[in-house]
Image (cartoon, grey):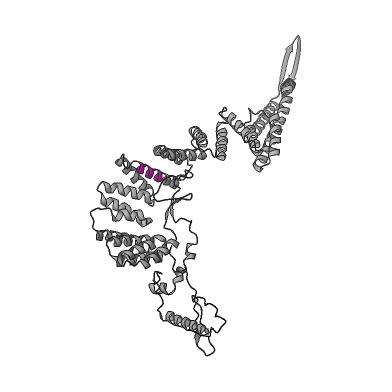
Amino acid sequence: MIRLLVFLAVVFALGLGFAWLADRPGDMLVTFNGYQYQVTLMVAAVAIVAVVAAVMIVWWLIKSLWNSPYTISRYFRVRRRDRGYQALSTGMIAAGAGDGALARKKTKEAAKLINSDQEPLINLLDAQASLLEGDHEGAREKFERMLDDPEMRLLGLRGLYLEAERLGDRNAARHYAGRAAAVAPQLAWAAESTLEELTERGDWDGALKLVEAQKSTRQIERDAANRRRAVLLTAKAQALVDSDPNAARTAALEANKLAPDFAPAAVIAADLVIRQNDVRKGSKILEAAWKVEPHPDIAELYTHARPGDAVLDRVNRAKKLQELKRNHPESSMAVARAALDAQDFATARREAEAAIRMDRREGAYLLLADIEGAETGDQGKVRQLLSKAVRAPRDPAWVADGVISERWVPVSPVTGKLDAFTWRAPMERLGQLIDSETDLPVPAIAAAPAADGKAIDIVPDAPAQKPAPANGGEKDMAAADAAGEAQSIGQDSELPPLPDDPGVAPEEEAEKSPRRFRLF
């Protein structure tokens, strides 16, 4: 666009010049070698312009002829480079599609047309073709040669890292990831692997610095960075509890501030604060965490925050937690445990049965069995509750990669992943409630009308009768029918269970149907 404007400006200026000369007629006299030449100004101006144009054309022709060898060679070189880049592009597409044969063919073609020193992608395509062909040793050698080139170093480290991961050599993989993170900390794969190495070694300060670098380079979001920092600070506090309580307290409080819903951070922060005789502040930390998500560790520390408290005071503190989070099984379980310690069996039983109604699980049945044993000592009911506990779903625990831990740990022992443990129910007991016949809901069966208008009771759990003997067993059959009718009448006379019945079968029903009782 600028060139066009300049050209138009020059033409316009020449037009103005010739118009100005045409309006002012005159002659030009030139004496040369004894001769005089007289022409008008217009002719002289046209002649000068023509001479300048001729000189420029002649100079362009001479320059073109002089540069023609370079121009021709440059044309063929550009054409060769374009063909090479076309082969390289086709080869990269073939490598991405998994076509090893075509990728190798295009690699050779591109290497002939383009110098690998000028285009590093040829080395990448060569290594990818080797991987597709199954030549992993050759691919590793190519990746190792890339380490000598500063431009290809990160690519080589990435390839060696993936090969080490494929072979299961975690130490080698972390070594290459550490070298890459030292050169380019913004690489997510290198930073994640280095973070796993630092956490496995227990270098919590180094891991915190790396997370801060990830946050500054926007590799991870702010919320994710705060969560990771909370986990690392909690792990640091656990490591410094005995050696440096003040530093542990600072780290734990910062972790609790970053993630108020993270129970391990709240527990260790409150514990360290309570150790320094600040029970009020520790209780506030636990209450805030309990409001977000109740946890048995929070309830245990909260009820025993003051060692000198009486058992009734612990019951009151447990009830305070229940007021903060109503209609939650952990709240009822906390009150039930404290009431059992205080030998308030009525409150303990009521809260344990309420916990079972809200969440039928193993711990609630075990607690109810402890209450039954402490209050009545009835071993039959205790065994019945224990059998239900065996078949009930397990209580939530810290689970990560198939590993169940009694206490929270920051790193998975299987994969080394940070913040892998989650508080949930283990999944190894699928279908345990199907084995519990006493807990299965029995569908209601409508009574079929008889011929005389009376209803016939259908008893789904009536025991199967043996066939009558062939030699006159009418009396035995009649006696069995009479016993079945008596049992049906006895069952119909019982009152139906209330809606808030916890599901514990009475002792008399257990004695009537012994086939339902299972010992573990």
Residue closer to the observer: 51 or 306: 306
Quadrant of the rendered image containing residue 324: bottom left
Taking the spot 47% from the left edge, 39% from the top edge, the residue there is 217
Judging depth in this view, the residue of 449 and 357 nearest the camera is 449
Majority SS type along the magenta span:
helix
Q: Residue furthest right?
A: 35
Image quarter hosting the C terminus: bottom left
Residue 235 in the magenta stretch? The answer is yes
At horizontal 49% and vertical 42% (from top left) the residue drawn is 219
| Residue furthest out toward the bottom | 452
Residue 395, horizontal then vertical, whole percent: 41, 58
Residue stretch rendered in magenta on the structure: 229-242
Query: Please, which residue is most extreme toward the front here?
Result: 471
What is the x, y in percent for residue 193? 49, 39
For residue 493: magenta? Answer: no
| Location of residue 158 (image quadrant) | top right
Which image quarter is the N terminus in? Answer: top right
7 lies above or below 406: above
Asked whether, in this view, residue 472 is left or right of residue 243, the answer is right
Q: Is residue 18 above or below residue 407?
A: above
How many tags in the picture? Answer: 0
Measuring from the top left, give residue 315's x and y in whole percent.
28, 61
Q: Is residue 250 left or right of residue 42?
A: left
Looking at the image, residue 302 lies above or below residue 174: below
Residue extending furthest toward the top: 34
Location of residue 510 in the rendering, given as x and y in whole percent from the top left corner: 41, 72
